[in-house]
Amino acid sequence: MKKILVFLFAVSCFSGVYAQTLFTYGNNTVTKDEFLRAYNKNKTTVTDKSKALKEYLDLYIKFKLKVKAAREMHLDTLASLTADLQNFRTQIEEGYLSDDKEVDKLVQEAFNHSQKDIHINHLFIPVARESDSLKIRDVAQSAYMSAMNQKSFSQITDELNKSPIQAEWADAGFITAFTLPYAYENIIYQLQPGQVSKPLRTKNGYQLFKNVEERKAAGKLKVAQILISVPPASSDSDRMRACKMSDSIYKALQNGADFSEMARNYSNDKMTFITGGELPEFGVGKFTPFFESKAFALKKDGDITPPFETEFGFHILRRLSHSPIPADKNEAYIYSLKQAVQQDPRMSIAKDKFLKDVLIKTHYKKNSNLNLNDLWRMTDSFLVSGKKNAMGSVNENTFVHSFDNGAVKVSDWLDFVNDYKTSSGLYKGESDQQLMDKYISVSAFGNYRKRLEKFNPDFRYQLEEFKEGNMLFEVMERNVWSRAANDSNELKSYFERAKNKYLWGESADAILVSAATAKLAADAVQQIRNGKNWRQVLEDGNTQLQADSGRYELKQLPVSDKIKVSEGMITDPLLNTADGTASFVKIIRIYPPNQPRNFEEARGLVINDYQNLVEERWIAELKKKYPVKINQPVFQSLLH
């Protein structure tokens, strides 16, 4: 009975494995999953799924046969293909050295934050001496309770400043995603309007934030400004003169004066007056709250503010454009948020999470017997002498930590510390232990990077696709393309056997002229129509105009479908919307359809057809060498 059960279990297991095999070629198998991965990556919208799958299966079988032939020829060991594969690996591996899910969470959070602006007040209570830390903590907690009881940050600051403890508060205006450090932003966006955050201990003291109000995201503005500056040491009379000048300019603008011209003539902003006062596009949190309030109060493009004063002088702003923050996750906006996240310190959250995963996957294990004091002494000695002299129980072969494929030795650690401390701009005065933490991260990521194929199936598949694609190109070049293109005798023989196939459609001797712009094309057409020799027109156009001549089928010519061409005609330019170039044609002579082509005229078509014939014969040979068997039940399951 047991033997029967074991047999039935084995059969069921075998059936399960076999059921996933879509086809075999020789001793090689291709699974349903592998085929679907390729099909789904390359598929387009189809009306007949069954037909599309059958056609792609035929293509994929031929592809695998060709790659098999390439392997048999050892093309995968060619130095050029190996170098290409390594270059490709280097290009794509960075994209696999982060946790996409964690990055996506940060992007989603940034998107949510970007949907609203929050007006905040900020209270800072400094810790002058570390010995006062506990005392200041109690003060900060008391300030928090006072704020919770509706006392303003201004009142709290005034009360604290009557004591030895000094505090500062500020109305920071509106903020949005990426305006403040992430730690602050995250706290603020958890507050409800009117709510105050608990004291946050930072390096220099305690921070408290209050959500004063919220609004829908104001978006980004582009404005131009005229600045009549008032330097800090200016007298009252200088300030009054600046005020009167700004009023005069404003009146002139109201009477129709050109804003750009007034900015060029009168603005003291050295960065923008040349461009008519135009400032780079900005969002909330870029300038002072008062300046931003004036800018965002402009309702329409072209609106102008009356003069207003800041610490820099008197400003007049003109709204140029407004870009709202997208409320939906359009691709361009999400991409820009992802770029911002990846360049922001908040990315360390995703990196720390990913590091934990890497340490687990690589089976990181620290040397619990390592004497750190001896290691630090040996490190200091090495940095001074350049010699890896043993200290106590530690020598250069002692292992610091290990992964499942080997140990990292003290000598590796010493080289890292030396490179890190001597590389310009890297060393920030970290302690030995902080450097060790950094080294654990560096060595773990390095180990993971070298073995990405093992840890990430998508990376492995992408590498294999590139490798097989290169092998396919090389084997096709050797077995089909070069062979067909270079065998002139066979090509001519093939042409003679099928010359009735190579007939001209309705055609013309013509001169095709392409121009860098539509205007250049239009000017050239006009000159030729006015009697100027076309060669002279091209010569005068330098490299902006180029021409080609020959016999072309009319359907190949860059001519509007609505135009009926005739001998001697010069067509109107046809614009290429992809790159802004334009083309026109001078028709010399028109031929009726179905005239025979000679070998040279048909050569391109003959090569293409002969290549297809050579490829068909080669595929037939490969199928004999590696018989193909399709698992029909599995294929049928793809159709549902």
Image: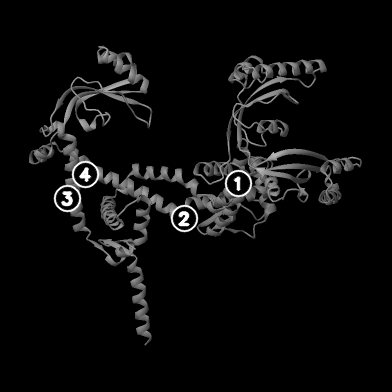
Picture disc at residue 297: none
Q: Work out whether residue 31 or residue 498 is closer to the camera in this orientation and state it.
A: 498
Badge 4 is on which residue? 480
Q: Using the numbered discs, state the Cα–Cα distance from disc 3 to disc 4 in whole angstroms.
A: 10 Å
Badge 2 amino acid? Asn
Badge 3 is on which residue? 617
Residue 578 in the image, given as x and y percentages of width and height: 37, 32
Q: Work out whether residue 417 or residue 340 is closer to the camera in this orientation and state it.
A: 340
Looking at the image, residue 88 sits to the left or right of residue 378; the answer is: left
- Disc 3, disc 4: CB below 8 Å? no
Identify the mark nearer the N-term, 1 or 4: 1
Identify the mark nearer the N-term, 1 or 3: 1
Q: Residues within 10 Å of mark 4 (few under 14, many from 20)?
A: some
Q: How many marks?
A: 4
Residue 23, placed above or below residue 596: below
Residue 417, placed above or below residue 600: below
Looking at the image, residue 47 sits to the left or right of residue 428; the answer is: left
Residue 406 in the image, given as x and y percentages of width and height: 52, 57
Q: Residues within 10 Å of mark 2 (few under 14, many from 20)?
A: few
Badge 4 amino acid? Val
Is residue 347 at least partly visible in the picture? no
Q: Using the numbered discs, state the Cα–Cα distance from disc 4 to disc 2 in whole angstroms.
A: 35 Å
Tell me the quarter of the picture where residue 380 sits.
top right
Badge 1 is on which residue? 110
Q: Residues within 10 Å of mark 1 (few under 14, many from 20)?
A: many
Badge 1 amino acid? Ala
Badge 3 amino acid? Arg
Q: Which quadrant is the N terminus positioned in?
A: bottom left
Identify the mark nearer the N-term, 4 or 2: 2
Residue 520 in the image, given as x and y percentages of width and height: 35, 19
